[in-house]
Image: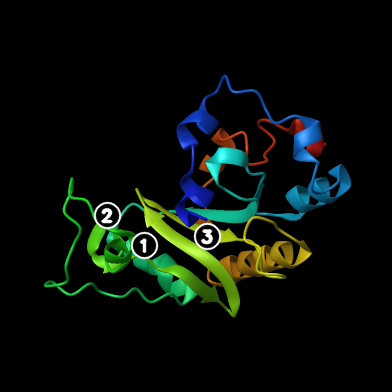
Amino acid sequence: MNLLNKIFGRKEEEKNPNKQKLSDSYLFRTHPRSTIRSWVNDLKFGFYKRAWGGHANDGDEFGIWLNYSSKEELFRILEGFNIVLNRIPDNYPKAVHGKSYSSEEFDKFKNEIKDFPEYEQPSHISISSIPCFCWIENGKLSLSLSGAEDGNRYEVTETDFNNCLAIERTIEKEKLEAYISKDYEEWVTHISPKYYPELFE
C-alpha cells in the first residue's frame, strides 16, 4: 500500500466543497454508528478518517495534524513528541526529475522533507511506544494511526483509537495545543461537524 495515499491521497477531490458526504451505508459498513459517534466525540485534537477505498488505495485511520510556520516551530513540535530527524548527507544520491528508475533503485533514495530538504521524512516512528506514521509537508506535520492490533494498516480498531487518545495527552503535556490544525474538516472523508453534524449532536 502507498502510505502517502493514506494521508494525502485524492485530497483535491475530497476537499471539493461541493462533494457530497459519505453515505451512511458506506460510512458505517466497518464500524457501527454508535462506535464512530463515540470515537469522534471523545477525540479532542484527532480525527477518524473513513477511506475512499478501491482504486484510491488508502485505508481507514486516526490522524492528528499540527501546523508550523517556521523551522523553529517544527522542531518545537518534534521535540514535544521526542522525534529526531535524520539529516541527509550532502553527497547522498537524489532522484533526477524525469528519469526512470526501477523500484529497487527508487527505494534507495531517501524521502526528503520538501520544506527542509536537508532532513529525511520521519515515516514509521513511535511516540511514547505508540507506532504511527509521520509525514511533514507544506507547513503541516501529520500523524497517522492504524493497524496497531493486527498489522492491517487499512483498518482501525479500538487499539488505534486509544493510541490516538494517548498522543492527545502527550500534546497537552507538552503544551502543543497551539499548533493543532483543523484543516482536516475540509475533507469529507475526515469525520467532522462540518459534514457530519448529526454525529456530534
CA distance for labels 1 and 3: 14 Å
Colouring of the image = rainbow
Q: Secondary structure beneath disc 3?
A: strand
Question: Which quarter of the picture shows residue 14?
Answer: top right
- The residue drawn where x is 88% and y is 46% is 34
Place of residue 52 in the rendered image (x, y in percent of width and height, measured from the top left): 62, 39
Q: Amino acid at mark 1?
A: Leu
Dot 2 amino acid type: Asp
SS at mark 2 in the image: loop
Q: Picture coordinates of residue 5 (x, y %)? A: 49, 48
Which one is earlier in the sequence, the residue at label 1 or at label 2? 1
Q: Which residue is mark 1?
A: 74
Residue designated by label 2: 115
Given contact means CB atoms under 8 Å apart, are the residues at marks 1 and 2 in contact?
yes
Q: Which residue is mark 3?
A: 143
> Residue drawn at (80%, 38%), measured in percent from left and top?
199
- Depicted 23 relative to depicted 129: above or below: above
Of the 4 image quadrants, the one containing the C terminus is top right
Callout 1: few (<14), some (14-19), or many (20+) C-alpha neighbours within 10 Å?
Answer: some
Quick one: which residue is furthest to the bottom in this view?
129
